[in-house]
Image (cartoon, rainbow, N blue to C red):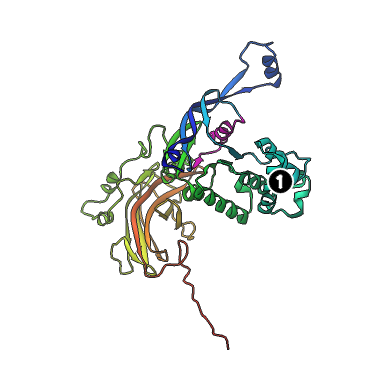
Amino acid sequence: MTDTNKEKPVIRVQNVTKNYRLYKRQRDRLWESLGLDFRKNYKEKHALNGVSFEVKRGETVGIIGTNGSGKSTMLKLITGVLTPTEGKIEVDGRISALLELGAGFNMEYTGIENIYLNGTMIGFSKEEIDQRLQSIIDFADIGDYITQPVKSYSSGMFVRLAFAVAINIDPEILIVDEALSVGDVFFQSKCYRKFEDFKREGKTILFVSHDLSAISRYCDRAILLNQGDKVYEGTPKEAIDIYKKVLVDQFHKGSGTADAAATSSEEGGQALKSGENRWRDQFPVNPSLVEYGEKNAEIIDYGLYDEKGLPTSNFIKGSECTVKMRIRARETVLEPIFAFTIKNLKGIEICGTNTTMEKIPVPTMHSGDEHIVTFTQRIDLQGGEYLLSLGCTGYQDGMFRVFHRLYDVISLTVVSSRDTVGYYDMNSTCVLDPEE
């Protein structure tokens, strides 16, 4: 495959809008369809508003967003299940799609009959399906149920069979809508291994998922939708950081990665008492950190310390590390929660904790009150570069609130002479007994 082909978009979405008409009564819909009523007896719901993006050949692109943001609608438009109200969609390649659970299945047919039904709908001949049948049955791995009507299947069996069909018909573009979350952990693992196989083969994958770790791990890019608008397109890490702001109602349209309502880190540092040295001045603080929150309580200082109490961002694997932060209340805050997480450079959260998980009660803070919290732990991460994030959250009027978050504020380096598999070292011991 030439580099030119790799750069060629296989999916092009241009200014796509999708509107739905919501009728108060079913008869209003009927009368209008028959041309018997010219009044506007409906409200328009904008599922997508002028969305544009491209997916290149061989890319894996994730779409994230809250429920109702337009993710599933977008996939249905790309696969041709729906037609856009405005705009244009171009697809260059054979699509295999796994959308709503059981879509494309006849509930009265057996699993095998549905394999032939789905294959025929995609455009395969009986001979071509015959060649793929055993591979589909083996991947689905649902035993004798394959010969039973699918109306007797559990949701997990549905997903197994549907995904097995979708990935074994040699698609050029695979589109998946959240369905993998229904399968068990072993099946999910098998599906993601198949994703990796597809990536190596240069095939294109577009999928919707609430599993942010999967978005970080498998996607080259991510698209964030919110209330029908595309609010970000770029690295999975940035998309996830902004999505977390959306989840706590801290994203403001047009603010980009920096919240216009959030004050700068510099202002927070100036909140220290006169003559005090800032802990964070001893570290190279990330100039591109993501900061947001209501600032009812604010993280005004932070630092990392080794087992001797010395400030450092470099740690020997197996040594002790202390995360320290100072929080000041600007108004009354009921039982705040203080937290830290450590992420890898792709944005996957590796470890972390908070005062609630550690069963440390934090009393109500009043305006001007300050707390210093320290988390001390042994660093058993594998050697490499990591990012530290800090947070102060809580509940006000029964609602979860983000008072202040600082994402990726300090880089943390772990130096190791012995690494094992994965992110974390379990400190295993190994004994080999010779045969007697």
**Res 321 quadrant in image:** bottom left
Residues packed near mark 1 inside 10 Å, few (<14), some (14 to 19) or many (20 plus)? some
Q: Is mark 1 on a helix, strand or loop?
A: helix
- Compared with 406, 414 (above or below) is below
- Name the residue rendered at 69%, 51% in the picture: 134
Residue 277 or 317: which is nearer the viewer? 317
Type of the residue with mark 1: Asp
Reading the image, the residue beneath label 1 is: 130
Residue 217 or 357: which is nearer the viewer? 217
In the image, taking residue 169 as reference, residue 351 lies left or right, namely left
Residue 255 or 35: which is nearer the viewer? 35
Q: Is residue 373 visible?
A: no
In the image, taking residue 263 as reference, residue 135 lies left or right, namely right
Residue 210 is inside the magenta segment = no
Q: Tell me residue 358's x, y (percent).
A: 47, 61
* Figure disc tally: 1
Query: Split into 4 quadrants, where in the image is the C terminus?
Result: bottom right
Q: Tell me residue 348's x, y (percent).
A: 45, 52
- Name the residue rendered at 25%, 57% in the picture: 282
Q: Give the range drawn in magenta.
A: 60-81
**Res 99 quadrant in image:** top right
- Compared with 391, 96 (above or below) is above
Residue 76 is inside the magenta segment = yes
Q: Tell me residue 399's x, y (percent).
A: 51, 43
Q: Tell me residue 353's x, y (percent).
A: 45, 58
- Compared with 115, 344 (above or below) is below
